[in-house]
């Protein structure tokens, strides 16, 4: 995976810089997401791999995505096919989305609770997290009964474990020391 990320980074960065310059970040994000989905499809990948030339691969890929890709998007696909990098398109889409989130000063936060959070609780949590991260926060809420009570908050490398289960585990570790 890290190799694909290394391969994808220059393509994602170039696409992002072009999108910023043209003021079309959202449309590029949509295009790359779609192209990444097509590239990660097993049937499409096997058909593309069976084609004899990079030009044929790019032409077929662009025909499949004709409705979703503009001219610059089709050029990106062509360049990636010529360099044998179509397999990296899902990673390009993922990196582009990360660049977009950084540009928009947004962060996705996963919140795990024992029971569903009420709208008011979510709003309060968003306000606190926006202050903490100094970014606009998008919550992804889920439930897990093993949490028992409290919350587990994850964003990137940051994990805030305020769950009852987490506190009990920390207490047990402290008592065993």
Image: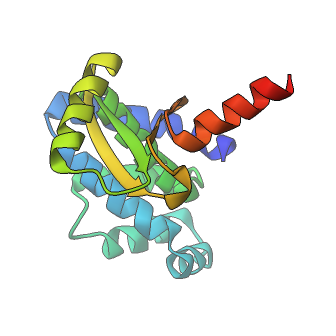
100 displayed left or right of 85: left
Q: Position of residue 57 (x, y in %)?
A: 49, 69
118 displayed left or right of 164: left
The residue sitting at 25% across, 70% down in the picture is 66
* Figure label count: 0
Query: Which quadrant is the C terminus positioned in?
Result: top right
Q: Position of residue 47 (x, y in %)?
A: 55, 81
The residue sitting at 13% across, 34% down in the picture is 23
141 displayed left or right of 112: left
Does residue 7 show up?
no
Q: Is residue 140 above or below residue 131?
A: below
Does residue 172 show up?
yes
Determine which quarter of the picture holds residue 35: bottom left
Instruction: State the residue lying farthest toward the right.
Output: 177
Front residue (pair 57, 157):
157
The residue sitting at 31% across, 69% down in the picture is 65
Front residue (pair 56, 163):
163
Q: Is residue 66 above or below residue 104?
A: below
Front residue (pair 158, 38):
158
Q: Position of residue 132 (x, y in %)?
A: 33, 18
Q: Is residue 94 above or below residue 127?
A: below
The residue sitting at 28% across, 51% down in the picture is 117
Q: Position of residue 64 (x, y in %)?
A: 34, 75
């Amino acid at each position: 995976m890290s190799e694909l990320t290394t391969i994808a980074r220059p393509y994602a960065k170039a696409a992002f810089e072009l999108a910023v310059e043209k003021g079309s970040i959202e449309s590029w994000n949509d295009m790359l997401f779609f192209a990444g989905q097509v590239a990660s499809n097993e049937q499409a990948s096997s058909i593309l791999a069976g084609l004899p030339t990079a030009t044929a691969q790019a032409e077929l890929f662009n025909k499949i995505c004709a409705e979703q890709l503009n001219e610059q998007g089709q050029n990106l696909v062509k360049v990636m096919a010529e360099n044998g990098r179509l397999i990296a398109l899902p990673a390009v889409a993922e990196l582009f989305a990360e660049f977009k989130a950084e540009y928009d000063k947004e962060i996705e936060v996963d919140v795990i609770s024992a029971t569903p959070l009420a709208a008011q609780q979510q709003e309060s949590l968003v306000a606190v997290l926006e202050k903490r991260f100094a970014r606009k926060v998008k919550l992804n809420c889920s439930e897990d009964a093993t949490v028992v009570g409290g919350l587990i908050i994850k964003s990137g490398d940051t994990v805030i474990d305020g769950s009852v289960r987490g506190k009990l585990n920390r207490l047990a570790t402290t008592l065993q020391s």
